[in-house]
Image (cartoon, rainbow, N blue to C red):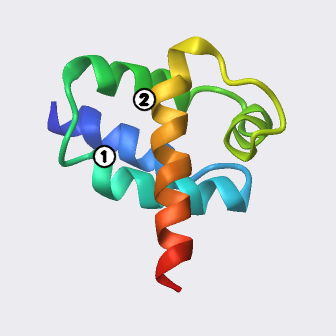
Amino acid sequence: MRSKLGKIGYRAKYRSIREMDLIFRQFWEIFKNNYSEEELAKFEKLIGEDDFDLYQWISGATAVPDEYQLLISQMRGQIARSRGKK
């Protein structure tokens, strides 16, 4: 399980779009310590999606697929909280 988490963490933190690097790196730091097996499976599937699609979903430019609603909502909340701290 530990090596699986390492692989998921690496894929989450090193994306092809810099903005996604930042968003996913922040989210992963919190998520990796508090997840269910189902949430981890969904997150692993989410990070397999195209970065352009991910950016569109997170920014609200396009509708988020139902299966990712909760994760994207959590990411948006984290972004809002981090902006509030500055």
Q: Which mark is residue 43?
A: 2
| Horizontal side of residue 79 vs 65, given as left or right | left
Q: Position of residue 33 (x, y in %)?
A: 18, 48
- Residue occupying image coordinates x 38% and y 51%: 28
Indicate the quadrant where residue 23 lies: bottom right
Instruction: Give neighbour class at mark 1: few <14, some 14-19, many 20+ (Cα, 10 Å).
Output: some
Q: Is residue 51 above or below residue 70?
A: below
**First along the sequence among labels 2 and 1:** 1
- Residue occupying image coordinates x 22% and y 37%: 3
State the residue lying farthest toward the right: 61
Instruction: Give neighbour class at mark 2: few <14, some 14-19, many 20+ (Cα, 10 Å).
Output: some
Along the viewing direction, whichever of 10 and 28 lies nearer the viewer:
28
The residue wearing badge 1 is 31
Q: Position of residue 56 (x, y in %)?
A: 79, 38
| Horizontal side of residue 8 vs 4, given as left or right | right
Q: Secondary structure at mark 1?
A: helix
Q: Position of residue 86 (x, y in %)?
A: 53, 86
Q: Are marks 2 and 1 in contact (CB under 8 Å)?
A: yes
Q: Is residue 75 above or below residue 82?
A: above
Along the viewing direction, whichever of 15 and 23 lies nearer the viewer:
23
Q: Amino acid at mark 2?
A: Phe
Marks 2/1: CA–CA distance:
9 Å
| Horizontal side of residue 78 vs 3, given as left or right | right
